[in-house]
Image (cartoon, grey):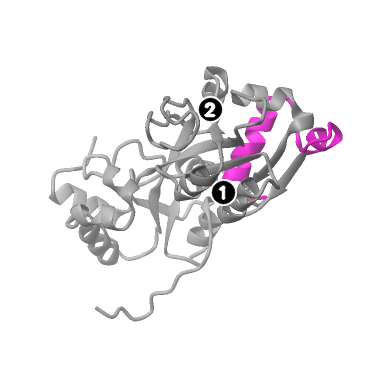
Amino acid sequence: MYRKGISTIPGGSLQNMPFVATNEAQLAWMQPPFISAGLNGEDPFEEKFENVSIIGNGFGTNHFHFVVDASLEADTVDDLFENKEKLNIVVTPVNNSDEWVFRKILDFYDTNYDDIKDAGGKVSHGSYDEQSDALRNGNATAIFSQLALPAAAITEVSVNKDIKILPMSEELISYLTEFGLEENPIPAGTYSDVVNGDEEIPTASMGNVLTVNSELDDETVYQITKAINDNIDQLPNIHGSLDYYTLENATKNLVGPLHSGAKKYYEEVGALND
């Protein structure tokens, strides 16, 4: 059915918070750490964005992957940063949510971009496709990305190249939870062609939240919420990670206010958590 006036704009968690708050966009995907930071005016934001509400939580989760050429002398993320002179890694562009998390990891290891460069290492920036191409073609020995399981970008590389996914230490994961990330290992067998793909790989993840401008009228938000939840069985056809979404999870662990239009729907179906 044709819908008049619907348009999309590119963004990400860091960009979407001001987009929604200023009504440049009415709907956007975001992730819990950035919603909380935006509402409170905390890093990476320099001001508060209060005009943002939530429609639902639990729309799949994205795992962080440290993927390296299997020939690299590193079996853990700790190893990777102990040998900065050998590090040639591609991460997403600056001021992207992945890159923000990467900088937090650099802080954990008491290093930064300049230190890596001074040690003889290299950090480049590119899209997920560009990261995969660089690893596949030997132009990088490592990539850092946040992707839903199983990530096609990694699966495709593993078919023709020996790669490993490095586990995070308990200490690193605990540190990342301070910023709203969650401990969430990659299950064994997720990547059958990855060298260590038969092992569970400790790492962190962030979930996906559907947000809305708080001033969007209740009826519109109610209908959006109803359309999603009346068709939950269709969500995995959009992306396999949406198989995780349930009505019960939609209002759990919210880091911001639930929009009144969404609240009306959840109350009607008895799904609102106290």
**In the shown orientation, is residue 175 left or right of residue 121?**
left
Q: Is residue 42 visible?
A: no
What are the residue bounds of the magenta stretch? 94-121
Given residues 246 and 238, the one toward you in this image is 238
SS class, disc 2: loop
Residue drawn at (55%, 43%), measured in percent from left and top?
145
Label of residue 24 in the image: none
State the CA–CA distance, disc 2 to disc 1: 20 Å
Label located before the other in sequence (2 or 1): 1
**Residue that protrudes farthest toward the right in the picture:** 118
In this rendering, is residue 231 above or below 88?
Answer: below
Q: Circle 1 — which element?
A: loop
Q: In which image quadrant can residue 114 be found?
A: top right
Q: Residues within 10 Å of mark 1 (few under 14, many from 20)?
A: some
Q: Choose top left, top right, bottom left or bottom right for residue 185.
A: top left
Say which residue label 2 marks. 178
Residue 97 part of the magenta-drawn span: yes
Q: Quadrant of the C terminus?
A: top left
**Amino acid at dot 1:** Lys
- Queried whether the magenta region covers residue 80, the answer comes back as no
Q: Nearer the viewer, residue 157 or 77?
A: 157
Q: Which residue is mark 1?
A: 48
Residue 178 appears at what percent x and percent y? 53, 27
Task: Name the dominant secondary structure of the magenta segment.
Answer: helix
